[in-house]
Image: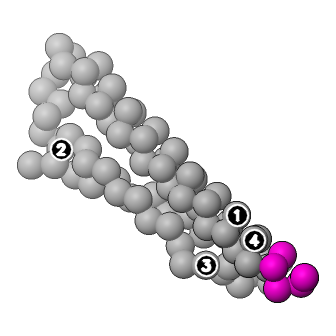
Amino acid sequence: MSMTIEVFVKIKDADGNESFEPVIVTGELPDFSEFTGPDNFLEIFDQVERTAIKVRNESMKQAIENYSSELSKKKHMKE
């Protein structure tokens, strides 16, 4: 059995309006039952940490790509 981590990223303007659909990135985490004691704690925790970092990085990458795309659209509209 496993668990899922989800990271949601929203970019809003000063009025609180979202500029585009939120980015949602998911990853699989070990279930709590996989922590069977001190012998495997560091190994399982490393898996959790690596997944969390990967999901965070991917969500931010996608959000910045969306931001850049919207910025490009707005710039072309002004020209």
Q: Earlier in the sequence, mark 2 or mark 4?
A: 2
> What residue is pinned by disc 3?
20
Q: Secondary structure at mark 2?
A: loop
Q: Residue furthest right?
A: 79
Residue 70 on image: x %, y %: 70, 74
Q: Nearer the viewer, mark 3 or mark 2?
A: 3
Callout 3 touching callout 1 (CB < 8 Å) = no
Q: Which residues are magenta?
A: 75-79
> What residue is pinned by disc 2?
31
> What residue is pinned by disc 4?
72
Residue 27 in the magenta stretch? The answer is: no
> What residue is pinned by disc 1?
68
Q: Nearer the viewer, mark 3 or mark 1?
A: 1
Q: Is residue 25 visible?
A: yes
Q: Nearer the viewer, mark 2 or mark 1?
A: 1
Q: Secondary structure at mark 1?
A: helix
Residue 24 on image: x %, y %: 44, 65
